[in-house]
Image: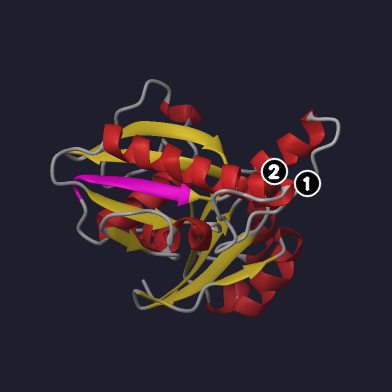
Amino acid sequence: MNRVLLLDRGNRFLKAAIAESGEIGPGMSVEPESIKTLIDESGGGRSLDGVVFSSVVPDWSVQLRRLLDVAGSGVVVEVGHDIALPFVLGVDEPQELGPDRISAAAGAWAQGAREAVIVDAGTAVTVDVLKGGVFEGGAIFPGSGLLARSLSDGTAVLPFVPCAAGEAVIPGRSTEAAIRAGIAWGSVGAVTELIRRSSPPGASVWLTGGECDLYAPLLEGDLHIDRDLVLKGLLEIYTINSG
C-alpha cells in the first residue's frame, strides 16, 4: 500500500485525503460535484494505488465508480456490509447499515478501541456501539441543521435559526436564543443519555463529524475527539481488503 485516495461522502459534503505509505495527509472538504477534478488532481491511474470510499448517496457512488473505471485507479474498495471488516456486524439488517457508521467504528477500532461508543455528529447524529468485537448498532436522530429547519418549516412563525458553537445560552431571552438553546442542549441531552444507556463497561467515547465543534464544548466526560475518525476507518478497511 503506497498512495491511496480516501473519500467520505456525507449528505452535504465530501471529505477527502491522501494516505501515503499508511500515513493520512490533511483532510479537505470539497463539493461532491467536483469529484472528477479531485481524482485528476490526485493523479488518477497514474499515481494512485487504490481508492476507498464511504458514501451515503447511492447515485454519487455510481458516478464515482464510473469515473474510477475510466481513470484506472488501482484497487477500489467501497465500504459496505459485504466486505471484510475488523469486527462482526451484529445488526438485524446489515445491508441497510450506513457505510459512514461502519467507517467511523473502524476508525475507533484502528486506534485500539474494542469497547466503544462512537458519536458521529453531522446532518444526522449517530451513536453506535462496539462491544466484544461486534458492531451492535445504535441510535440515529436529526442534527442541529435538520432540527432548525423542521421548526421553521413546521410552524407558522418560528424562524430558521442556525445553531453555532458557543451560542447556546440558557435561558434564551429571545425567540432565536431559545431555539438555539433548545436545539443545542436538547441534542447534547440526547447524546448524553444515549451514551449512558449504550456504553459497555470500560467503553471509550469517540466524537467526530461536521458538527463536532458544536458538541465538543458541551458534552461532559472523557471524550476522544477525532475529526478524521472516518478517514482512519477507511484506511483500516482498505488495508484489510486490498491484500
- Residue 45: give its label: none
Name the foreground residue: 141 vs 105.
141
- Magenta residues span 114-120
Provide the secondary structure element on which disc 2 rests: helix
Give x and y (percent) for residue 121: 50, 50
Mark 1 or mark 2: whose residue is earlier in sequence: 2
Residue sitting farthest toward the top: 92
Q: Residue at x 52, y 73 (%)?
A: 27
Q: Quadrant of the C terminus?
A: bottom left
Give the CA distance from mark 1 to mark 2: 6 Å
- The residue that label 2 is drawn on is 148
Q: Residue at x 64, y 54 (%)?
A: 163
**Left or right for 47, reference 149:** left
Q: Quadrant of the N terminus?
A: bottom left
Question: Type of residue at label 2?
Answer: Ala
Q: Is residue 117 magenta?
A: yes
Give x and y (percent) for residue 178: 65, 46
Give x and y (percent) for residue 212: 49, 59
Q: Is residue 151 magenta?
A: no
Give yes or no for contact between labels 1 and 2 (Cβ–Cβ under 8 Å): yes
Give x and y (percent) for residue 135: 30, 37
Provide the secondary structure element on which disc 1 rests: loop
The correct choice, above or below, for 26 with respect to 88 in the image is below
**Residue 43 is drawn in which quadrant?**
bottom right
Q: Residues within 10 Å of mark 2 (few under 14, many from 20)?
A: many
Name the foreground residue: 170 vs 36.
170
Q: Residue at x 51, y 63 (%)?
A: 213
Q: Residue at x 73, y 45 (%)?
A: 175
- The residue that label 1 is drawn on is 160
Name the foreground residue: 218 vs 223.
218
Question: Type of residue at label 1?
Answer: Phe
Q: Residues within 10 Å of mark 1 (few under 14, many from 20)?
A: some
